[in-house]
Image: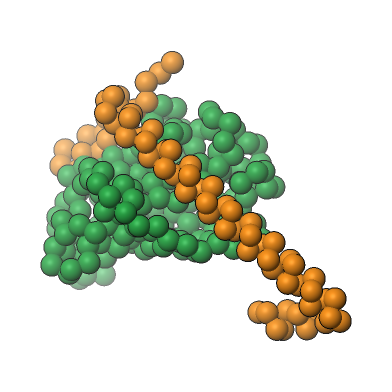
Amino acid sequence: MSKPTKTVHDCSTGIITEVELTAVEIAELEAMSERLTEQRAEEEVVAEKAAADKASGNQKLKDLGLTDDEIAALTS
Amino acid sequence: MSYELISHTTVSGTTTNYIDIQSIPQTYQDLCFWWAGRANGTTARNSVDFYLRFNNDSTTEYGNVLQYGKGATRYAGFSTSGTQMAWSGWPGSASYSNNQAASLFGYIPGYRNTTNYQGHHVYMQAGSSATASEGSSDSRAGMWLGQWHVEQAINRIEIGFPYETYAPNSTFTLYGVKNS
């Protein structure tokens, strides 16, 4: 399997090179990946709860007899 | 105001995790950039984390404020004390055929400024497209304020994926903005 790399552009020389990542750089990316995976899961929970709350709230307003247009006017 | 091209980098292979722009000239007022591309999608994940760092700094000096729509779902939030500015699960992975490309525009005002008492901000707008939602993937569009709480002139930008690689032909283009 090919080793992971970075594309480096040194603006002082204009030279672009493909450089293999060091063990330290790979470890840093792996640690970052773990943190971001946790963050993404938390964001999705928040977004899904907001969507569920919206749907539930809309249904309760409909149950009170409001039309979709009236609900939109109240909530937008 | 005028713009000058500093760097245009195109990824050619399939092993590149990130693009690293070094020795950025310290002769402009601001910086702005375009990123366009996608992840190569070798993992089973259907959306991909994406990040930026400055000056090879991996300390906990980064933050994000994000507001975006993902399909019909809206999200707003922030994070602090990160080791990168990141949008978790933003571009779709190519391993899912419904995911298409993503693009990102960013503006960095006063990138050489070391006396503004607030570090640096990156004002970004991003979008990604998908023909259908799969798992956490979908068409997304959002505003993203990246924060770097360090009073250093920015001379290096690292941008890419922590666990995925770039798809070939993805590009990063950096411009210097002159105020005259």
> Is B137 rendered above or below residue B153?
above
- The total number of labels drawn is 0
Q: Which chain comes out green in the rendered image?
A: B
Residue at position x 38%, y 46% in the image: B51
**Closest to the observer, B177 or B167:** B167
Q: Would residue B24 be found to the left or right of residue B36 on screen?
A: left
Q: Quadrant of residue B108?
A: bottom left
Q: Is residue B11 left or right of residue B155?
A: right
Q: Is residue A20 visible?
A: yes
Q: Is residue B54 above or below residue B165?
A: below
Q: Position of residue A11 (x, y in %)?
A: 20, 43
Is B125 left, or right, of B69 in this rendering? Answer: left
Spot occupied by residue B8 in the image (x, y as percentages of width and height): 32, 44
Q: Above or below — where is B54 with respect to A6?
A: below
What percent of the width, then of the height, locates residue B93? Answer: 55, 38
**Residue B126 against residue B22 in the figure, above or below:** below
Q: Nearer the viewer, residue B58 or A9?
A: B58
Q: Quadrant of residue B125?
A: bottom left
**What is the letter of the orange chain?**
A
Question: Where does the N terminus of chain A fall, quadrant-wise?
Answer: top left
